[in-house]
Image (cartoon, helix red, strand yellow):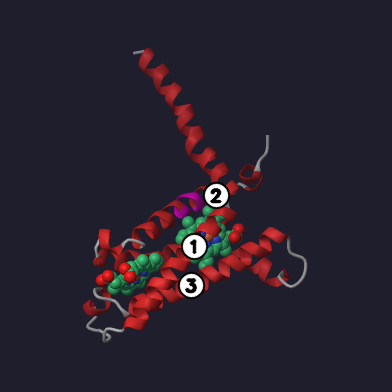
């Protein structure tokens, strides 16, 4: 039986899956700065720039391909993905810039501090909330990929591992 991930499975699929899980969890932690503490909030979200860059590089061929064909022949789902991805990119840039402008830890460590500005704070809050919404849409659009990849790389290996362990234990 073939499915979406098996058909398109490359050595990168597993890397993509774990990287996506990592950035998803990191994003949820950054959405609640009062629980994590502001230092973790700022350093973790800046570290996310690196993981998001890898996320984009792993899909670089897709980005180049759809960019070339966007005004011509592109399937409906790819077109929607492309637009949502751009919105995510623009909103993510706004989150990072506004966050840097109100930074209470990272910038002071570097000896820089901007005067408190309510507008940057509002923009930061607003772009973070829009980011959560866009991430929900991005996740929904890739839902079948997520389910199939989880099944292939997490659930099935665990299900195979349990009876193997039971057999080993019984033979002792
Ligand atoms: C916040 C965390 C994010 C999560 C959890 C996430 C998750 C995913 C998943 C599950 C996929 C499908 C599998 C894959 O190719 O990796 C994907 C694809 C993709 N994502 Fe993300 N993503 C995130 C943020 C972003 C952002 C901010 C951008 C744009 C700047 C982006 C751009 C893309 C692109 C270009 C693709 C491949 C093309 C596509 O099918 O849409 N992602 N993402
Ligand atoms: C993925 C990236 C980020 C997300 C999702 C995010 C999200 C948020 C959210 C939801 C708040 C709470 C707003 C409120 O309570 O009104 C907040 C506050 C804040 N964020 Fe971010 N943020 C991100 C990146 C950054 C960065 C890069 C910096 C600085 C380097 C930063 C600095 C701050 C500061 C100083 C606050 C105010 C905390 C307080 O209440 O004292 N954020 N952020």
Residue 57 picture location, percent across and down:
53, 64
Quadrant of residue 103 within the rendered picture:
bottom left
Please state if 29 lies on the left or on the right of 137 as rendered.
Answer: left
Specify the segment rendered in magenta. 16-20
Residue 25 picture location, percent across and down:
39, 54
- Per the rendering, the mark at residue 68 is none
Mark 2 sits on what residue?
13
The residue closer to the viewer here, 92 or 61, is 92
Q: Is mark 3 within 8 Å of ligand 1?
A: yes
Mark 2 and mark 3 residues within 8 Å of each other at the beta carbon: no
Which residue: 44% across, 22% down? 164
- Prevalent SS, magenta region: helix
Mark 1 Cα shell of 10 Å, populated few (<14), some (14-19), many (≥20): few
Labels 2, 1: front one: 1
Mark 2: which secondary structure? helix
Mark 1 sits on what residue?
133
Q: Is residue 17 magenta?
A: yes
Labels 2, 3: front one: 3
The residue closer to the viewer here, 64 or 90, is 90
Mark 3 sits on what residue?
91
Which residue: 22% across, 77% down? 109
The alpha-carbon separation of the residues under discs 2 and 1 comes to 25 Å
Mark 1: which secondary structure? helix
The alpha-carbon separation of the residues under discs 1 and 3 comes to 11 Å
- Res 2 visible: yes
The alpha-carbon separation of the residues under discs 2 and 3 comes to 26 Å
Labels 1, 3: front one: 1
């Amino acid at each position: 039986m073939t499915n979406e991930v098996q058909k398109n499975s490359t050595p990168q699929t597993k890397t993509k899956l774990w990287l996506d899980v990592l950035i998803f969890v990191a994003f949820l932690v950054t959405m609640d700065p009062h629980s994590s503490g502001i230092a973790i909030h700022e350093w973790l979200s800046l570290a996310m720039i690196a993981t998001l860059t890898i996320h984009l590089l792993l899909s670089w061929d897709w980005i180049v391909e759809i960019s070339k064909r966007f005004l011509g022949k592109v399937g409906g789902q790819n077109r929607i993905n492309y637009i949502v991805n751009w919105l995510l990119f623009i909103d993510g840039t706004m989150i990072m810039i506004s966050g840097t402008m109100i930074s209470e830890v990272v910038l002071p460590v570097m000896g820089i501090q901007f005067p408190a500005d309510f507008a940057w704070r509002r923009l930061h809050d607003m772009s973070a909330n829009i980011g959560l919404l866009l991430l929900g849409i991005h996740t929904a659009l890739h839902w079948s990929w997520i389910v199939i990849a989880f099944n292939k790389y997490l659930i099935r290996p665990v299900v195979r591992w349990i009876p193997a362990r039971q057999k080993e234990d019984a033979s002792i």
